[in-house]
Image: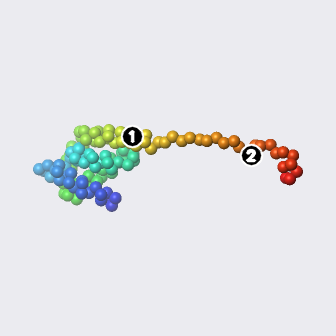
Amino acid sequence: MSQDINYVESIITALQATVNEDNEVDWDLFLIAEKETIINSYCGTHLNVFKGTWKRRFKEVASRLNFRIKNDSGDTNNGQTLICDELKAKRKTSSISASTTTSTKSTKSVHNNSINADDKKRA
C-alpha cells in the first residue's frame, strides 16, 4: 500500500463519514463520498484494474479501522456506474486530446540524379 499512502487519509475520512451504527461500511456509499478523489486519480489505466485498486484500498483501510464491510455492499452499483461513466468520458477526452496530427514533407531525392561523363571519369 506504499503508493496508496496518498489516499489513506481521504479514505479514512470517507469511511468515518459513512460508517453505520453497526460499524459497517458500504462500497457504494464510499464511492459516492470519494467520487471526485477517485475520478481525479484516474490516469488512463484499464478500468477493471483501476476499480480493483480502489476496492483493495477501501477494504484495507476499512480493515485497519476495524470496520466491517456490509454483506450487500456494492450490490446496487449506483455509485460504481456513476463513476465508471465519468471515467470512460475522461478516458475518451484524454485520448482525443493526446492524439496529434502529423504532416510529412516530401523532398526530391538526390540519389537518382544521372551521373555526367566527367563524374564517370573521376570514379
In the orientation shown, which residue stands out farthest toward the bottom?
2
Q: Position of residue 24 (x, y in %)?
A: 17, 50
Q: How many marks?
A: 2
Q: What residue lies at 36% left-to-right and 44% top-to-bottom?
A: 47
Q: Which mark is residue 111?
A: 2
- Identified by mark 1, the residue type is Thr
Q: CA distance from mark 2 to mark 1?
A: 45 Å
Label located before the other in sequence (2 or 1): 1
SS for dot 1: helix
The colouring scheme, among rainbow, by chain, secondary structure or one colour, is rainbow
* Contact check, label 2 and label 1, Cβ < 8 Å: no
Q: Which residue is mark 1?
A: 93
Depth check: give the residue in front, 115 or 72: 115
Measured from the top left, where is residue 107 in percent x and y?
66, 42
Q: Closest to the observer: 116 or 48?
A: 116
* Residue depicted at 15% across the width and 52% down the height: 23
At 28% from the left and 55% from the top, the residue drawn is 7
* Residue 60, percent from left and from top: 26, 56
Q: In percent of the image, x 21 and y 51: which residue is there?
A: 14
Nearer to us in this view, 122 or 69: 122
Query: Where 122 sits versus 89, above or below?
Result: below
Judge the density around disc 2: few (<14), some (14-19), many (≥20) Cα neighbours within 10 Å: few
Q: Amino acid at mark 2?
A: His
